[in-house]
């Protein structure tokens, strides 16, 4: 099904008894194939309002991300949270949509400075499982009118409703960027250096470690970038400096996790306390399970490629320091999303039953 | 202000309920004598007040859980309270409700500079969170003007923000996790010192839920390294339109000031009379603050002044030193006090798209002339969060009603141009009945379903946020 507008979508949902699989661009839905008819959002497309002077953009959910990025670039603006392109990593094709980005809270390296997709998302419209059209938030940055369902919808992976429109706060593209590159560091030393950089006053906008290279980024006005890069270099100890396009290329690779792309195995995405970022790889090592890792967010985000098994080790080692999502890999019996403590699971199930009482959307995807 | 009839059955059982609470808590934690519960009759919205059934001041999460379990069993509504500085009546009790105050829970539980977070009990005041980490070069970013008094508990309840949120975001952008006690008395941990939610973002909806989903007793907050320095520039303009256009131009240029504050002529005049900050004689002024090293600050201020030049500024003053910086901020910081000297006022809190600033300021001016009520404007311009102050004389019969009417009309105007009813103070009881201006029945229903899940009997801070008719069926329970 491919509804042409919100009203058609709402009507279809109201009359539906069988489940749907919601698809934006289909570039990176994760988890196991859910049952049901595919519900495509591509018909709900187009930028509705773009106000560069107010740093806000409103678009229908099926609008291709690339189209949005092109419109923004025309005014030298961008989505601050740097949504990744994981097609290479996950082995998918297709065109990501803005709604898919919101529904999966897809956030890249700049999360350490300007927050996740959910922090930039300021308004939504969606059709819930009863076919009701709901709006929340709006197109202003500060809004505490009623409950913040915007955040609840961000990262809900289509399990509470189908987004039809999303509003984002955007950001000006800074005139300069520079990246400090530390080569030949072990994981422990590299991650400690990233934390040191993030704890400094130099407004770091990226801190990653992958493929044996530690990277620290600063962005802003040219003079300021030069100054802060210099200060960070002094702090970190003589790292090399990449500027402009060379710097951008490094971060595109971090963002899209190219270090782990194109290879078989189970792929995990872990959100962890940065100082504990080595605990899971060490646990795998101790049990003799081969793996490769890439870190972003100063160690707070860990991508793990584990060719064989290891799910129990991963989930056990992350307990208390974060959580692990299985973004690719068919491991029978292993839940894709991190299992929740019973009382949290009860709240989650309660919300799902209220918003989607017939369990029409992405059934079984998320707990 | 209409409030629902209190439950006579609960009031009749007061002695029994208080005795029950005394069995759960240390003797000094339960307050029921009318002289002592007086301070809990209202929050910062003092026009409306009501003595609560009783107040409790627990010291631990376990005590909070015990109280809530007991109240759920006894059918007693509970109103969570931080410091009671809400301006929307969010912490105002009803006669059948227990005030649950977090004031005694103010400990720092953990500071972790390497992972850049602090964990506190939520009764801790906002400013003292920064106080706990500033010697080590860190700060907690959200900075409501009430930060000396207000508690993290209320900041989470209202998703509070301050002057610096243009760069650092509001509470929801700086909150990592909470310990929440539900009305059933269950202790739930949501989020933690890591970045993303593992499942649904429950934290996002708890923040800003105005004490209606549960009592937050502990929180993990993000802390940030302090910038090297900060400096403001003050710019005067010949019209509010020019100042408004200058704000949009600065924002669009890509410079990200930490604050852009706006004051109009009535407000400038009042503050000059009050504290003599030496502000220029002009229709509107902006205070723009930037951060960084001295050289970075210079670089940003040069650009900001260049941008301002295109909007015909009548005065520009940059702070050469710490002392001058203080004087630039002095008037802005005294603005509310200065207006208070002139008489009673009602402070509105609507948000509009920044691009609509000139039009809205213009229209507010017209409305002020039409009603004969003076309106002064002072607000966070960078994010469109307006605080029109309507001046009046509370002792003159009929004035309050006229002010309320004008206030409602101004907030409706905010919604009409694409904004919202409240940008930081919250809905509480104050804006409860205006909610249908911004939301349709399905929108309100969706929000109320969230409360159904967390608090099925609707005992937690009832009769706030949702218009009484909309929530009637649920409150009847
Ligand atoms: C746990 C997890 C973590 C991820 N982390 C990242 C990350 O850190 N960075 C990153 O870039 N990407 C991440 N992704 C991938 C993310 O899905 C894509 O970034 C997103 O842009 C895909 O866009 P799409 O239009 O192709 O969506 P699709 O692949 O079509 O859909 C993605 C998900 O969103 C749902 N969805 C799509 N459109 C709507 C809509 N209009 N309303 C409601 N639900 C909808 C789908 O049902 C599906 O569950 C992650 C995915 C998952 C599951
Ligand atoms: C002079 C002045 C200036 C102000 N400036 C600003 C400003 O710049 N920005 C801004 O955002 N606000 C401002 N405010 C409003 C107010 O200070 C904020 O809303 C503040 O966050 C309230 O905190 P509090 O601890 O006093 O909360 P309270 O008034 O006690 O409660 C506020 C709300 O939070 C709920 N709540 C309290 N404790 C808990 C808890 N433990 N768990 C769950 N819910 C709870 C209450 O039920 C209530 O709904 C200002 C107020 C004043 C008086």
Image (cartoon, coloured by chain):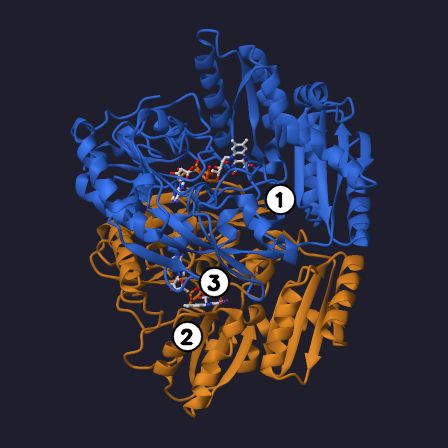
Q: Residue at x 31, y 63 (%)?
A: A362
Residue B468 appearing in the image: yes
Dot 1: within a 10 Å radius of its alpha carbon, few (fewer than 14), some, or many (20 or more) residues? many
Q: Please tell me which residue lies in front, B13 or B424.
A: B13
**Numbered tag placed on residue B193 in the rendering:** 3
Q: Which badge, 3 or 1, is on the more N-terminal residue?
A: 1
Instruction: Kindly identify which numbered label has been placed on residue B271.
Output: none
Element at badge 1? Answer: loop
Q: Which residue is mark 2?
A: A318
Same chain letter for marks 3 and 1: yes
Q: Give the alpha-carbon distance from disc 2 to disc 3, as whole Å.
A: 13 Å
- Toward the front, the furthest residue is B27
Residue found at x 43% / y 93%: A288
B354 left or right, relative to A121 = right
Q: Which residue is mark 1?
A: B164
Is residue A11 in view?
A: no
């Amino acid at each position: 099904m491919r509804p042409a507008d919100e009203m058609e979508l709402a009507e279809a949902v109201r009359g539906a008894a069988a489940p749907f699989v919601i698809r934006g661009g289909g570039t990176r839905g994760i988890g196991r194939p859910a049952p049901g008819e595919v519900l495509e959002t591509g018909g709900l497309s187009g930028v509705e309002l773009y106000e560069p002077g107010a740093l806000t953009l409103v678009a229908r959910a099926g609008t291709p991300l690339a189209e949005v990025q092109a419109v923004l670039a025309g005014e030298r603006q961008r989505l601050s949270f740097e949504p990744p392109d994981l097609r290479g990593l996950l082995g998918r094709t297709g065109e990501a949509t803005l709604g898919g980005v919101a529904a999966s809270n897809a956030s890249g390296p700049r999360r350490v400075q300007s927050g996740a997709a959910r922090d930039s998302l300021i308004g939504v419209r969606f059709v819930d499982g009863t076919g009701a059209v709901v709006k929340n938030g709006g197109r202003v940055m500060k809004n505490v009118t009623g409950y913040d369902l915007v955040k609840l919808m961000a990262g809900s992976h289509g399990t509470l409703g189908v987004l039809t429109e999303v509003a984002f706060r955007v950001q000006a593209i800074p005139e300069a960027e520079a990246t400090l590159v530390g080569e030949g560091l072990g994981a422990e030393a590299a991650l400690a250096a990233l934390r040191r950089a993030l704890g400094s006053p130099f407004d770091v906008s990226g801190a990653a470690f992958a493929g044996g290279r530690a990277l620290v980024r600063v962005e802003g006005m040219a003079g300021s970038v030069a100054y802060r890069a210099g200060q960070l270099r002094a702090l970190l100890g003589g790292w090399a400096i990449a500027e402009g396009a060379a710097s951008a290329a490094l971060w595109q690779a971090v963002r899209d996790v190219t270090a782990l792309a194109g290879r078989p195995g189970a792929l995990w995405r872990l959100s962890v306390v940065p100082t504990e970022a080595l605990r899971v790889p060490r646990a795998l090592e101790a049990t003799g399970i081969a793996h490769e890792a890439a870190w972003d967010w100063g160690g707070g985000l860990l991508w793990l490629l584990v060719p064989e098994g290891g799910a129990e080790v991963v989930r056990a080692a992350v307990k208390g320091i974060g959580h692990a999502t299985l973004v690719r890999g068919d491991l029978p019996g292993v839940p894709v999303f991190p299992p929740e403590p019973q009382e949290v699971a009860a709240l989650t199930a309660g919300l799902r039953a209220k918003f989607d009482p017939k369990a029409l959307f992405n059934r079984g995807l998320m707990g | 202000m209409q409030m629902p009839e209190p439950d006579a059955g609960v009031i009749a059982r007061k002695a029994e309920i208080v005795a029950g609470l005394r069995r759960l808590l240390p003797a000094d934690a339960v307050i029921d004598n009318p002289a002592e519960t007086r301070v809990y009759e209202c929050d910062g919205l003092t026009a409306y007040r009501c003595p609560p059934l009783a107040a409790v001041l627990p010291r631990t999460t376990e005590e909070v859980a015990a109280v809530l379990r007991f109240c759920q069993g006894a059918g007693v509504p509970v109103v969570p309270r931080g410091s009671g500085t809400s301006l929307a009546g969010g912490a105002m009790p009803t006669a059948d409700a227990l005030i649950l105050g977090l004031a005694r829970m103010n400990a720092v539980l953990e500071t972790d500079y390497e992972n850049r977070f602090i964990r506190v009990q939520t009764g801790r005041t906002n400013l003292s969170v920064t106080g706990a980490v500033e010697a080590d070069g860190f700060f907690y970013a959200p900075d409501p003007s009430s930060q000396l008094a207000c508690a993290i508990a209320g900041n989470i309840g209202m998703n509070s923000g301050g002057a610096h949120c243009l760069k650092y975001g509001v509470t929801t952008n700086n909150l990592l996790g909470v310990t929440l006690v539900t009305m059933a008395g269950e202790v739930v941990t949501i989020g933690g010192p890591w970045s993303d939610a593992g499942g649904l973002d429950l934290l996002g909806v708890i923040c800003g839920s105005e004490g209606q989903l549960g009592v937050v007793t502990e929180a993990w907050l993000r802390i940030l390294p302090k910038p090297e320095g900060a400096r403001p520039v003050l710019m005067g303009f010949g019209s509010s339109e020019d100042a408004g256009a200058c704000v949009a131009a600065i924002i669009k240029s890509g410079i990200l000031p930490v604050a852009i504050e706006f004051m109009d002529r009535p407000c400038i005049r009042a503050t000059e009379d009050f504290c003599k900050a030496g502000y220029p004689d002009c229709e509107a002024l902006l205070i723009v603050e930037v951060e960084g090293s001295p050289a970075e600050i210079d670089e940003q201020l040069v650009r900001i002044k260049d941008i301002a030049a295109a909007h015909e500024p009548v005065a520009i003053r940059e702070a050469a030193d710490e002392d001058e910086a203080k004087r630039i901020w002095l008037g802005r910081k005294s603005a509310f006090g200065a207006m208070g000297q002139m008489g009673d006022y009602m402070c509105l809190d609507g948000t509009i798209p920044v691009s609509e600033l000139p039009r809205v300021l213009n229209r507010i001016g017209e409305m002020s002339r039409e009603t004969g009520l003076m309106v002064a404007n002072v607000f966070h311009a960078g994010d469109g969060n307006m605080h029109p102050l309507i001046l009046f004389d509370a002792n003159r019969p009929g004035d309050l009603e006229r002010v309320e009417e004008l206030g409602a009309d101004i907030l409706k105007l905010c919604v009409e141009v694409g904004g919202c009813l409240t940008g930081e103070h919250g809905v509480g009881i104050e804006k409860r009945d205006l909610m249908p201006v911004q939301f349709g029945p399905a929108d309100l229903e969706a929000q109320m379903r969230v409360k159904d899940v967390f608090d099925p009997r609707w005992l937690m801070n009832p009769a706030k946020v949702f218009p009484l008719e909309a929530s009637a069926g649920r409150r009847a329970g």
